[in-house]
Image: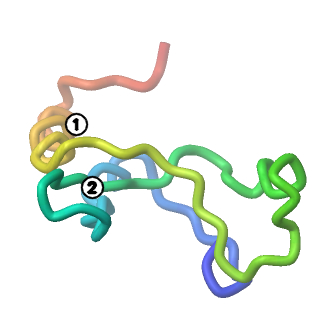
Amino acid sequence: MKDREITSIPNYELLHSAEKIHANKALELVDFPNRDSTTYQKLYDLEGVETFIRGTMRYKGYCEIVGSWVDLGLVNDKF
């Protein structure tokens, strides 16, 4: 949810949506949302916030590598 609007990112675009985290110059991280974050707002008592994203952090480069595997069809989320 961003600016009180629920958004959705298709699985095949998820890793390409990663954004750089500006927290520490020595540690380069990126983050991307994971699954339906809105179900966690009540759990964390954050129901009134305008933007709520629950995500995964990875080292810079991870999303490009794994995202290319997805693009090549090497990763399958249908089991």
Residue at mark 1: 70
The image quarter in which residue 18 lies: bottom left
Q: Is residue 4 above or below residue 52?
A: below
Instruction: Give the residue at x 67% y 49%.
Output: 36
Instruction: Give the residue at x 31% y 65%.
Output: 23
Which secondary structure lies at badge 1?
A: helix
**How crowded is the residue under tag 1: few (<14 C-alpha within 10 Å), some, or many (20+)?**
some
Residue 55 numbered mark, or none:
none
Rendering coords of residue 48 (x, y %): 86, 77
The image quarter in which residue 70 lies: top left
Render colour scheme:
rainbow
Residue lying furthest top: 79
Q: Is residue 72 above or below residue 4?
A: above
Residue at mark 2: 30
The reply, left or right, for residue 20 in relation to residue 76 is left
Rendering coords of residue 24 (x, y %): 24, 61
Rendering coords of residue 9 (x, y %): 48, 60
User: Residue 35 versus residue 50: which sits nearer the camera?
Assistant: 50
Q: Is residue 49 above or below residue 76?
A: below
Instruction: Give the residue at x 36% y 45%.
Output: 57
Q: Is residue 8 above or below residue 72?
A: below
Tell me the kind of residue under disc 2: Val
> Could you give the CA–CA distance between mark 2 and mark 1, rounded to whole angstroms?
18 Å
Which secondary structure lies at badge 2?
A: strand
The reply, left or right, for residue 1 in relation to residue 40 is left
Of the two numbered discs 2 and 1 on the same chain, state the one appearing first in sequence.
2
> Quarter holding the N terminus?
bottom right
Tell me the kind of residue under disc 1: Val
